[in-house]
Amino acid sequence: MSLRFNRRSLLRGVLGGGAVALGIPTLDLFLDGHGQAWADGARLPVRFGTYFWGLGLTDTPAGGTRWVPKTTGPGYEITPELEALRPLRHKVSVLSGFRVIGDGRPNIVHWTGHASILSGVAPAVNNRMDAPSFDTRIADAIGGGTRFKVLDASASGKVVSYSTRTGAAFATPETTPLSLYTRLFGPGFQDPNNADWKPDPSIMLQQSVLSAVGDQRQALMASVGRADQQKLDQYFTAVREMENQLALGLERPEKCESCVVPGAPKSSIKGASVDVVNANTKAMARLLAMALACNQSRVFNFVHTPGASETYMAGASKIYHQITHDEPTDTRLGYQVETSRLAEQVMQGLGDFLAELDAIKEGDGTLLDRSLIMAFSDTGYAKIHSIENIPIFLAGGAGGRHKAGQHIAGKGDAVTRASLTAQMIAGAPAGEFGVGGMRTSRPIIELMA
Amino acid sequence: MRRFATIAGSAALATAIVLSAGIAVQAAWADPPQSTAGAEQIVAIRRLTESQYRHAIADAFGADVRIEGRFEPERREAGLLAIGSAQLSITPAGFEQYFRLADLIAGQVTAPERRARLAACQPAAETARDDACARQIVSRVGEALFRRPLTEAESAARVQTAAAGAEHTGDFYAGVALALKSLLVAPEFLFRMERAEPDPAAPGQYRLTGSTKAERLSFLFWDAPPDAELRRAAASGELHTAQGLRRQLARLAASPRLQQGGRAFFTDMLQLEHFDGLTKDSKAYPKFNQALADSAREQTLRTTVDMLFVQKRDYRELFTSNSTFINRHLAALYRVPFNSKGDWAAFTFPKDAERSGIITEATFLSLFAHPAASSPTRRGVKLHEIFMCEPTPDPPADVDFSKVQALETGTVRTRLLAHMENEGCAACHRVSDPVGLALEHFDGVGQRRTLENGQRIDVEAEINGVKFSAAPGLGLYLRQQQKIPACLVRNVYGYGVGRAPDERDEDYLADQTEAFASDGYRVPHMMVRIASSPEFFKVKLPARAKPATKVAAAATHEGGLQ
């Protein structure tokens, strides 16, 4: 009955020979008891989120695009498809010209692009990544000490997340604002600003439930093959996170001045048209932002629309994916008009999302100023399934670590440079990222303070 | 044998390294024939599906226990979630759900009105611990949930949880609830751990343990854990004998629970989980709502199970029959009368309705379409994938889409013809589109129509030189395709063993398909034949665990942190 996964017993376990495949990030060892600051009391870790949307942005095939600013560095101009970012342009960096280097692997349409950005390697097969997604590294580094090491949400009704530790099993997202609200602020939530806080004695009984489960770990781990060991490892990591969640419930939560517990959202309309997806995005952004402000989590993954997005203009018979391929380039305007209109709508989702984070005041700035959001897509120009010039944005000041508001031209560099930069700014212990032609140890230093 | 020798050699090396680092690592799996001879090995771990979880709870505690919660998404591999389930684990968000569900279930089953059902014993006092009674409850429920008797350690841990809980709360049943909760979140419940043991009849070989065989059988036939009789047969060794296995198979196949097993199999094979994320445009399809989606799903399962498992008809009739079951929602969608007083009624479509089996049900037609339009390509792709086990390759990345232009007028056929002119596209579209085009008299939710954008819809199609027209023509074409029963056999086998068949299974599958044909394509008989064949219990040893050298190195490194 002794197996408890706190740091001390972990160390004991490691020294006692139980290190076979315990999925515990070394970094936890360096954090202080609450995981809120580095052990030497240095600055707070930032919050980190990924934001994904499907089908990239639009090219003007004769030359140029509808989104890449002409000038690089600070003060870039707002192009038509970046219109939604105008109010926050000084907090958003635009990364253009980065590409996937496949090392001979095929371009698996609507998968290779974001799988490469997240895992650092062009995947061999569809719906599988060849390495863990990098958000998990960040979550391991900064997500400890909160109720949810990472939160996953999807706004289009599709049960889709691209966050994975094994490459095969992906995180389970909340798919409606109401379910996200219930997970965050329903049973188990403790208002950090509640003056009458008392520890709930039943939590200790719940802890005893898990210790019996942990007792079997050693015996099980020793009697399985490699692949099954990984699965059990992931299961026991989940048990440990539940333990952490329970342990936190026994500690008086630290006051959060910006935390205002929101009311329950109304149950939303089920739909995939872009107006519905954007409305869900906004509602979920508000909840995620408050979850960060209330110190329930520090890391999230958000999917606006999946790759090969099936969103559409309400009432239209064709979906976005189909339109990107079928619509001819307008001979007079030089681009796909309907495609670009949908791209603008989809980017409105991102603009609204960031605005919700920026609406929460924290210290002398906003929540967005203390966060880093990396937004990206599955393709560059979707009509031709391009995995060059995939649009990537880094938003938020990351507590002063991100020199935001710049346009960086990647000039054909690997997308993994952006991923590495995000990891370093967010505080993950990464010195390099990616495999083969996409292996890099060069972050985009222009963006790093 | 060579394989074992290699493993043994590397294990010896690993052990030496481990010992030199002064760390005791259990390297049991690395060396099955020697150091752990006689021991069981876990050869596969498969996460329980949502319906298996629900059936397990109903069997252990009663069908009236409420299970309200969300389950983690499953993963489809080689056409089946059952095969994907062997690759899945449980994420933190998923575990939270299981933990919450366990609370909900344990609370219900220890409530005063139900606690008598938990075990024959009564605690000496309801306000104190009673280890003997707690042990009885833990043993009985534990055996049902873990699908085998609990080990002493597993039992003792839960009895201790119950005792501590009772002491803290002054309530025996509050303690029991905690112990049950601990069983309900245990990996031995949430995962099917398939075990092998040395085969006494064949030295050096492994066979599945009796309880693993029992699990494979009951999950295939009933989608539920083994019942007490099957567990008894497993424990007594009867399942290792041909006669004992035959007796249990006859019992499994004769049980009304076979329908539950059939439902689960077809829910998986027909990819009905797509209903979870299905949305339709309300302007294009005002009749579509959640109630209709639920009805469509139920129609498909009722019709399929009744035809194949109750009436035991020829599998191929699934593509040609115009008999089905409908309710009020579906009657409105199909524009037919509904005269029954009950919720559901048997119904036979008239000939001119052009309904021809499962491919013309609202399920297939709406799942594989766009939110506001039909999609012949998607329907064609899915028809090949689901019923013929022929997945379509991913589209090439470098298609020249300049020839494929939007059309606001005319029918979808015109647009697809453009794909046919493009060599990169044609290879797949020539296969997928004709069958989809034959279904174009049905829109994106399955309502019949004959016009699109004011033009008559052409439902003529040709594939491999065979011409047919509309859904009934397609149904007859499919009935003749040998691939269709062969695909079902492949799926039933893969579903049962939790592994994608490979080339070494081809002869076996061909023989099974032949037997299926000579028996008139009766599905339950085919399931019994498969489950009684040695291939159904074949042991595939997994790749070894992480090399112990690595473990030692990692441990040394961690030790250095001290």
Image (spheres, coloured by chain):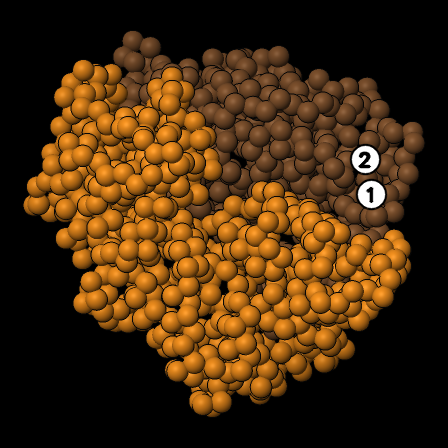
Chain colours: A brown, B orange
- Up-down relation of residue B189 to residue A203 (above or below): below
Labels 1 and 2 positioned on one and the same chain: yes
- Up-down relation of residue B347 to residue A370 (above or below): below
Q: Chain of mark 1?
A: A
Q: Residue furthest front?
A: B341
Q: Residue at x 38, y 66 (%)?
A: B253
**Tag on residue A190?**
2
Query: On the rendered structure, is A299 left or right of B217?
Result: right
Q: Residue at x 32, y 27 (%)?
A: B333
**Tag on residue A249?**
1
Q: Residue at x 56, y 46 (%)?
A: B72
Q: Amino acid at mark 1?
A: Gly
Tell me whether the residue at label 1 lies in contact with that at label 2, contact meaning CB atoms closer than 8 angstroms: yes
- Front residue of B138 and B398: B138
Query: On the rendered structure, is B78 left or right of A353?
Result: left
Q: x and y percent of residue A308 in the render?
A: 40, 33
Q: Is residue B459 visible?
A: yes
Asked where in the image residue B424 lies, by quadrant, the reply is top left
- Front residue of A250 and B250: B250
Q: x and y percent of residue A82 in the render?
A: 52, 17
Query: On the rendered structure, is B136 left or right of B42?
Result: right
Q: Is residue A367 visible?
A: no
Label 2 SS: loop
Q: Mark 1, residues whose alpha carbon is within 10 Å: few (<14), some, or many (≥20)?
A: many
Label 1 SS: helix
Label 1, label 2: how far apart the Cα atoms are: 7 Å
- Up-down relation of residue B163 to residue B89 (above or below): below
- Give the position of the C terminus of chain A as an image quadrant: top right
Q: Chain of mark 2?
A: A
- Front residue of B407 and B266: B266
Q: Amino acid at mark 2?
A: Gln
